[in-house]
Image (spheres, grey):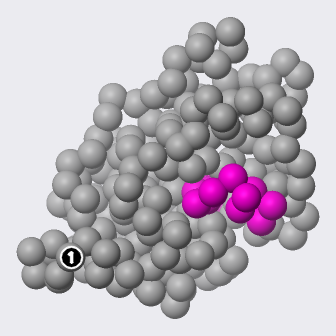
Amino acid sequence: MVDEPSGQGNGAGRIIQAASILKEGGVVAFPTETSYGLAATIDNEEALRRVFLIKKRSPGKPLLVLISTIMALDLVARDIPETARILMERYWPGPLTLLLPAREGLPFAICGDTGKVGVRISSHPMAQALVEAVGRPITATSANISGHGPGCSAEEVAAQLTNPPPDFILDGGRVCKDHCSTIVDVCVRPIQVIRKGAIDPEDILS
């Protein structure tokens, strides 16, 4: 179901609707500062399985995670290196995903066999409000078929993710940027840029 802003009240009401779907085990597409993401709560194994199914994603590729505040890191990470804290202060909220030592017990869909979890805080107001309304971490993998271009609008997401579709698409207008989030592994020394994105790796490594 695609969100229709003009027909479903104010933005807060639509975010509450999307959050309710997630808390009930659904999958929701939503806007971030880089592109649309695909959300499920990280504590629902069936919802996580559906994210992989919707994206046609290899099960060995872990899903990235959004949290609402730095305090929520305790829910997903067992340790926060000092380098990570410096980068968080500099770039969060924003398009920087940090690979941190994963807390024990996280689903395989979130950390695979890496022992790491990719996490960030989004700077997009609707994404931030959605995580806060859900009250726990959600996935933030791009809302597209794996290997295809990102969904830059609710309409593009609906056209691409059809078999099966997400349960709900939260319409935040067109949000696509030139780059996805930059991914940095802070579990190694020296830290490594795993994926180039919206933040210049030279700025991070300098």
User: Residue shown at 50%/39% (left/top)?
Assistant: 94
Disc 1: which residue: 10
The stretch of residues the image draws in magenta is 59-75
**Residue 71's spot in the image, x, y percent?**
73, 58
Q: Is residue 190 left or right of residue 45?
A: right
The one nearer the camera, 22 or 147, is: 22
- For image coordinates 44% across by 51% down, the residue present is 142
The spot of residue 31 in percent (x, y) is 34, 56
Which residue is at the front of the view, 23 or 47?
23
Residue 202 in view: yes
Left or right placement of residue 9 versus residue 145 in this view? left
Quarter-of-image position of residue 155 = bottom left
Residue 17 vertical position relative to residue 50 in the rendered view, above or below: below
Residue 111 appears in view? no
**Does 166 sit above or below residue 116?**
below
Residue displayed at 33% across by 29% down? 178
Q: Quadrant of residue 177?
A: top left
Residue 123 lies, with reference to residue 136, above or below; the image says above
Is residue 93 on the magenta stretch? no
Q: Which residue is rendered at x = 74% and y = 30% of the image?
A: 86
Q: Quadrant of the C terminus?
A: top right
